[in-house]
Image (tube, grey):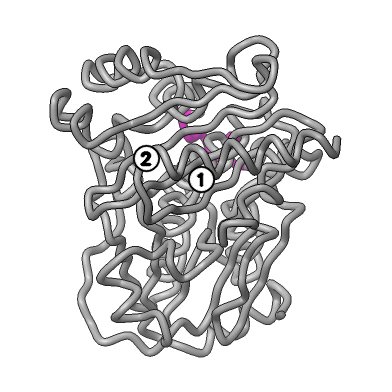
Amino acid sequence: MISLNEAAEYLRGVDHILILSHQFPDGDTLGASTALCRGLQQLGKHAMIKCSDEIGPKYRYLFDGVKPEEFSPDVVVAVDIADLTLLGEPLVSQYGKKIDLCIDHHPSNTCYAARCHIDPKASATCELIYTLLKQMDVEIDQLIAASLYTGITTDTGCFKYTNVTPATYRIAADLVETGMNAPKINRLMFDTKSRAHMEMERRVVDTIEYFYDDRVAVIVITQKMIAETGAKEDDMEGLSSIPRQIEGVLIGVTIREKAAGGYKISLRAQQPVNASEICAKFGGGGHAGAAGCTFNTTLEEAKTQMVSAIGEYLTKL
């Protein structure tokens, strides 16, 4: 494990840096990637970003001002990626054994990189990238600030979640002071929904099942639903929060069918539940309030195993 200052010194000494984002990219991994890329380019370095999934229209503004580059990297950096499997193919095959630096805030991080800086106290990886860039004497301009703010606001639910700390607010205030448009980003992230998203939401609500005296709610997202609505990855964001929003629900479970087969399960939990502990039983992880894992089984088997594990967990509370 290295400090952010050591990470800054390491990056100062290299010139061609590849930055990796995780599959099913969200605001934090893309915000951290684009902020770091802009910062490195500002310092005269060559930097580029790769993600196994296409970046949808919702997040394309994050790439404004990022110079497109293509080169053979000296260093590979992973941001907001707790485990190699989250890179998705083909990035796992291409770079899985070549990651030189990982910067992340997930307590379940497997420390797969040659150098790691993991801080579970940070609300978002973008908090760490902010500090890293400051230590590298990068000017936090409006474009970099917009990227960092996007990661922080999305990973904190617009500052609603329990992972928010005083440091989170201070960093956010510094970013807003650059003049970047925080209300516009908040509106885009939280108050704007595509028609495809609304159609997905309607279908998903119809799948809700309740367990354990209605303390657990389960929803299902199938490839058929995605095909019927024409939903892209951006259109899927926020669906996993639906079951947790139901009054009395401690654990919201989203079971999503993967295109290549199998299922990805996302847990959203209220205190005192630790979602990461539940997902760890199946080789997954994350945070106390949000975690995930995968099942290469049928839908019913995945649901049965997860619901059973949750039941065992609840009996110990």
Q: Residue at position x 43%, y 59% from top?
A: 33
Of 21 and 202, the residue lying toward us: 202
Image location (x, y in percent) of residue 17: 39, 79
Q: Amino acid at mark 2?
A: Leu
Q: CA distance from mark 1 to mark 2?
A: 41 Å
Mark 2 sits on what residue?
A: 299
Q: Residue at position x 40%, y 70% from top?
A: 19
Looking at the rendering, in which quadrant would you find the C terminus? Answer: top right
Question: In which quarter of the view is residue 18 placed?
Answer: bottom left
Image location (x, y in percent) of residue 284: 56, 57
Name above or below for residue 48 compared with residue 145.
Answer: below
Q: Residue at position x 60%, y 68% from top?
A: 137
Instruction: Judge whether residue 170 can be spotted in this image.
Output: no
Q: Residue at position x 53%, y 59% from top?
A: 80
The tag on residue 145 is: 1
Image location (x, y in percent) of residue 119: 72, 61
Q: Amino acid at mark 1?
A: Ala
The range drawn in magenta is: 175-181
Looking at the rendering, in which quadrant would you find the N terminus? Answer: bottom right
Q: Secondary structure at mark 2?
A: helix
Say which label, 1 or 2, has the lower sequence index.
Answer: 1
Q: Secondary structure at mark 1?
A: helix
Name above or below for residue 248 compared with residue 13.
Answer: above
The tag on residue 219 is: none
Of 274 and 156, the residue lying toward us: 274
Question: In which quarter of the view is residue 160 placed?
Answer: top right
Task: Characterize the local packing of mark 1: few (<14), some (14-19) or many (20 or more) Cα atoms within 10 angstroms.
Answer: many
Question: In which quarter of the view is residue 290 placed?
Answer: top right
> In the visual, does 102 lie left or right of 278?
left
Task: Characterize the local packing of mark 2: few (<14), some (14-19) or many (20 or more) Cα atoms within 10 angstroms.
Answer: some
